[in-house]
Amino acid sequence: MSTQANVSTDLFGSTRLGNLNLQNKIVMAPMTRSRALGNIPNSTMAEYYAQRAGAGLIVTEGTSPSPNGLGYARIPGLFSREQVEGWKLVTDAVHKKGGKIFAQLMHTGRASSIGNLPKGAEVLAPSAVGLSGQNWTDGEGLQPYTQPKEMSAEQIRTTISEYVQASKNAVAAGFDGVELHAANGYLLEQFLNPNSNRRTDSYGGSAENRNRFVIETAKAVAAAIGKEKTGIRISPYGVFNEMGAFDGVEEQYESLAAGLNEIGLVYVHMVDHSSQGAPEVPESVVLKIRKQFKNTLILSGGYDKVRAQSNLDDKKCELIAFGRPFIANPDFVHRLKIDAALAVADQTTFYTPGEKGYSDYPTLN
């Protein structure tokens, strides 16, 4: 059971997250939107996030801690001075509207095309196991995913230090904290899953070894910026980017949750992609993580108002994250509260540059 002492479980009531006061228990989930031209956040992005500052907490789109992690077109980074300055526009705009915002740190690892990386960057992964299919590049259109190079011990240490520096940069840019993206088949999850991690050193083989990179990264980031500013996202049973379930998945994530609890991270954000066709995360996994991790638990995945309130009342979690409804409904929290109709997002503009289908959706008023 959580150590959080919420007076009320009302979805729309205020709550605490670490040292932060949140205006409600609704989280805007991280969603890639590909509007960062040159991988630098901009004023259009600031407007987009400020429009959605009615959420108790916003978690940004995946943001790379390294030039090596910029696997998709037009995703932002947090490793250069220009990127920090760009993000200041976003955090200032959100804070002026009374919102709180964490930066999601997402290193794409093998889910990458070399055409999206700057000169000198490399596609790295736990093992040289490539992804099938194609990935969009602005320069050459659809291209096959680039075969990754297996990370050396030195590259692992360097990558952890990049996460640490990006976290410090996030705080310098005005973020309230960071979320480590260990879900959806990106680098941190690539280490967790034996389908992508074939290593035979101390970072592969056993479940404990596969957890090591995530635990070491989380520990280093929490030490650098504070555990109250450090969260993590996980997706047991996720299949995105050719992950897929494996023997011992529940026990591994139970052990991972215990390790994250020992570090004292402010939250674990667990996503269930079954609403988008992935296998459902069994209730047993949620309960095991709930038992091991004592701070805030965020659940996400296809929620509506009734189910969200029910989960809060049952103390399965402290916060509920919603994703796609926020795209076409900048005033989503207000609409949800008064049971107003939700606008439907134009999927053809999810990842296109510019304001169309991004910052131009109207509010009810």
Image (cartoon, rainbow, N blue to C red):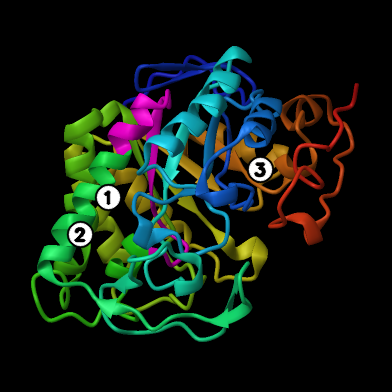
> Could one spot residue 324 in this view of the protein?
yes
CA–CA distance between discs 2 and 3?
Answer: 34 Å
Q: Residue at x 49, y 18 (%)?
A: 15
Which residue in the structure is indicated by mark 1? 257
- Amino acid, disc 2: Phe
Residue nearer the viewer, 52 or 296:
52
Report the residue at 45% width, 68% height from top: 237
**Residue 6 location (% of width, % of height):** 45, 19
The reply to whether the magenta stretch includes residue 170 is yes
Task: Say which residue label 3 marks.
Answer: 307
> Which residues, given as a range, are shown in magenta?
167-186
Q: Which residue is mark 2?
A: 213
Q: Nearer the viewer, residue 271 or 330?
A: 330
Q: Quadrant of the N terminus?
A: top left
Give the number of the mark in front: 2 or 3.
2
Tell me, yes or no, whether the highlighted magenta stretch contains residue 298: no
Of residues 302 and 326, the one drawn nearer to the viewer in this rendering: 326
Q: Looking at the image, tell me whether mark 2 or mark 3 is earlier in sequence order.
A: 2
Residue at the image point whose x is 57% and y is 25% from the top: 56
Rendering coords of residue 351 (x, y %)? 68, 57
Which amino acid is tagged 1?
Ala
Disc 3 marks a residue whose amino acid type is Arg
